Amino acid sequence: MATFVNSKALFQLLLLPCLLLYISIAYNSSSVEAAMHTNNWAVLVCTSRFWFNYRHMANTLSLYRTVKRLGIPDERIILMLADDMACNTRNNYPAQVFNNENHRLNLYGDNVEVDYRGYEVTVENFLRVLTGRHETAVPRSKRLLSDEGSHILLYMTGHGGDEFLKFQDSEELQSHDLADAVKQMKEKQRFKELLVMVDTCQAATLFNQLQSPGVLAIGSSMKGENSYSHHLDSDVGVSVVDRFTYYTLAFFERLNIYDNASLSSLFSSYNPSMLMSTAYYRRDLYQRHLEEVPVTNFFGSVMETIHTDAAYEALSRKNSDRFEAQMSLDQSVHHEERRTLINENDRDEIHNINTEGQEGASKCPWSTFYSKMQKIENVDSLVNYGLVAMLPFLVFSTWLFQ
């Protein structure tokens, strides 16, 4: 009887760490899979009406042009413009909007897709875009269809104050409204990382209530400070761009889609003497170092690199076949969902080969099994492996109780 009790106790002691190991591997595998960065989105919002707020529409269209130039397609941009300055009767340049008095760049060209216009730009619709709580009649083009792998740029410009931003000069978005919406987005896995950029007076106060992890925020001014326009266009008759947005654009005009400039370099480029205010950024909710995060993680596209052994004009037959297979795969899988998968898998394979080459001779069977379990990214496969691994313990326990 004592032998039976000891055997039962021994089985329980062996079973407990195995179960803990299984749960740990399953949790780590699902975490790695959920943490993958797969796509970028931009939500660009001009909240001001009336002709004298021309610069706010120019601010938003300028950021719209920048993120498109750096690779974010229109189907992943939500553009909200509270007024149509291009068709205003006071505009000496009909159907055109400029952000500089030299009039070299028309921001309101042929390729502008406005998703919310005029009186559609309300606090309610803005919060619905963020949280995804739309009525069934709202088309997909007006929805933020992000997921747990999305990096989202949220840019807002207009008139604001201490913990509020005015919409249409008739209602306000409060800081706690923004914080609640971001919290819902995080709980519903609508983003991996979120960058909130606000160009308005006392912009930093709009971030006070944010509590969700993975959020980075930057504003054009501190509490008690105003956000100023940059220059006046005498032909248009009003200011055409704000200082914070102007120097943001100056930074990005020096970059292209392949540059690796960091968020730290962007934030450090703001000179208080030039802005006439103090740019403030909040990073306590953001886990990564700004020096390690390229600006294209939010302002550009997720890049995909296809490695070849020779130049395209001199591809060998083997490489040509591989390239054709790769192109076939590109057609069958959505482009945005594959962009980082290829690079991540290539790096994992190289790391795994090197690790196995260094440690293959000295590994015991259990450590080999454990390392293979760590590499599994498919949760269903992990469960199957776990069930198979439990069979020897079930057989052993059955033998003990006989």
Image: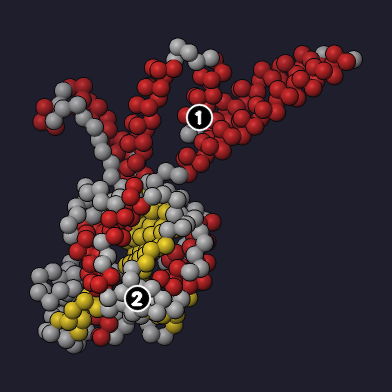
Q: Helix, strand, or loop for circle 2?
A: loop
- Please tell me which residue is depicted at 54% across the width and 56% down the height of the picture: 187
Residue 154 at x, y = what percent?
A: 37, 64
Position of the C terminus, as image quadrant, is top right
Residue placed under numbered mark 1 in the picture: 374
Q: Is residue 123 left or right of residue 75?
A: right
The residue shown at (38%, 50%) is 289
- Answer yes or no: is residue 201 visible: yes
Please tell me which residue is depicted at 67% across the width and 27% down the height of the picture: 17
Vertical relation: 392 (above or below) 87: above
The amino acid type of the residue labelled 1 equals Gln
Between residues 24 and 42, which one lies in front from this camera angle? 24
The reply, left or right, for residue 387 in relation to residue 324 is right
What secondary structure is marked by label 1?
helix
Residue 287, horizontal then vertical, whole percent: 45, 51
Name which residue lies at 33% across and 39% down. 332
Indicate which label's residue lies in the foreground, 1 or 2. 2
Number of residues whose C-alpha sits closer than 10 Å to that of mark 2, classed few (under 14), some (14–19) or many (20 or more): many
Considering every residue shown, the one lying at the far front of the view is 273
The numbered mark, 1 or 2, whose residue comes first in the sequence reads: 2
| Residue at the top extreme, as displayed | 361
Residue 64 versus residue 263 in the image, above or below: below
